[in-house]
Amino acid sequence: MSGLFRLTVASVLLNAAAICSAHAQADPEFSGIRGRGAMYALGVMLDEGLGVEIDEHRAFEWYRRAAKLGHAESMNRLGILYLQGRGVPRNAWSARSWFRLAAAKGSLTAINNIALLYFDGLGVRQSYSKAARFLKMSANRGNADGQNKLGMMYAGGLGVVPNLRKARGLFLKSAAQGYSPAMVNLGLMLTQESNSDTHDVLPCAPIDQSNALAGIQHALLTQSAIGSGKPISVMGTGQHLLSGSP
């Protein structure tokens, strides 16, 4: 994600936070808020502490209200809260339910998060092949994060037949959208190519399979902060599955 885009998103949210803060000062219960977008913005404010103190319970409530009105990203956020156990008891099954509802509304981030559940066996039977299947759904619809993570699955041979050419192609598509983790992965792959004696035979040097699982787990789990119990920055919504800082 480019710096300009991130700055624009931050500016929009801060403006929303200012508007919602004004409502809060006039009415502590935000009783004047009716639109689902405004409800979601309030949830983000309370979830991440944007202009107000973090209050995960109230964030949950505003996400829930917006979700009842069909707001897909609020549904996805509810799933994340349930998965992390923030504001509500940890419940992977409920997380899955909300991710599925959000995915049905078109949220590619939610589809990626369903892949997370299958990748690590959270509330479902662990299955790399099902994780890859959901990532394919996201990647085929142009989601940069899904493309990058599916590329890692192909590179490591988890849930799919190892295919370094497909991995590189997915990294290229993701990187072309300005997605920095894919740029890093592509750079590592190209570095392997330049140092490999098999450059003319294989698209890149063979991957050490003993490290593949750990590497993909790090990318799918710790990059998103989903497993850490930390709030996920709004910069990650709509674009990242499982990405950001550990």
Image (cartoon, rainbow, N blue to C red):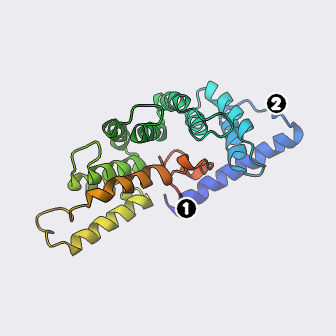
In the depicted structure, whether residue 133 falls above or below residue 143: above
The three-letter code of the residue at mark 1 reads Leu
In the depicted structure, whether residue 140 falls above or below residue 61: below
Which residue is at a point 40% across and 56% down the rendered structure image? 177
Is 188 displayed left or right of 197 in the figure? right
Crowd rating for badge 2 (residues with CA inside 10 Å; few <14, some 14–19, many 20+): few
Which residue is at a point 36% across and 39% down the rendered structure image? 131
Is 8 displayed left or right of 186 in the figure? right
Q: Quadrant of residue 94?
A: top right
- The reply to whether the C-beta atoms of the residues labelled 2 and 1 are less than 8 Å apart is no
Residue 123, position as x, y percentages in the image = 48, 32
The three-letter code of the residue at mark 2 reads Ser
Per the image, label 1 sits on a secondary structure element best described as helix
Q: Where residue 31 is drawn, which disc sits there?
A: 2
The residue tagged 1 is 4
Is 26 displayed left or right of 55 in the figure? right
Q: CA distance from mark 2 to mark 1?
A: 34 Å
Pick the front one: 95 or 17 = 95
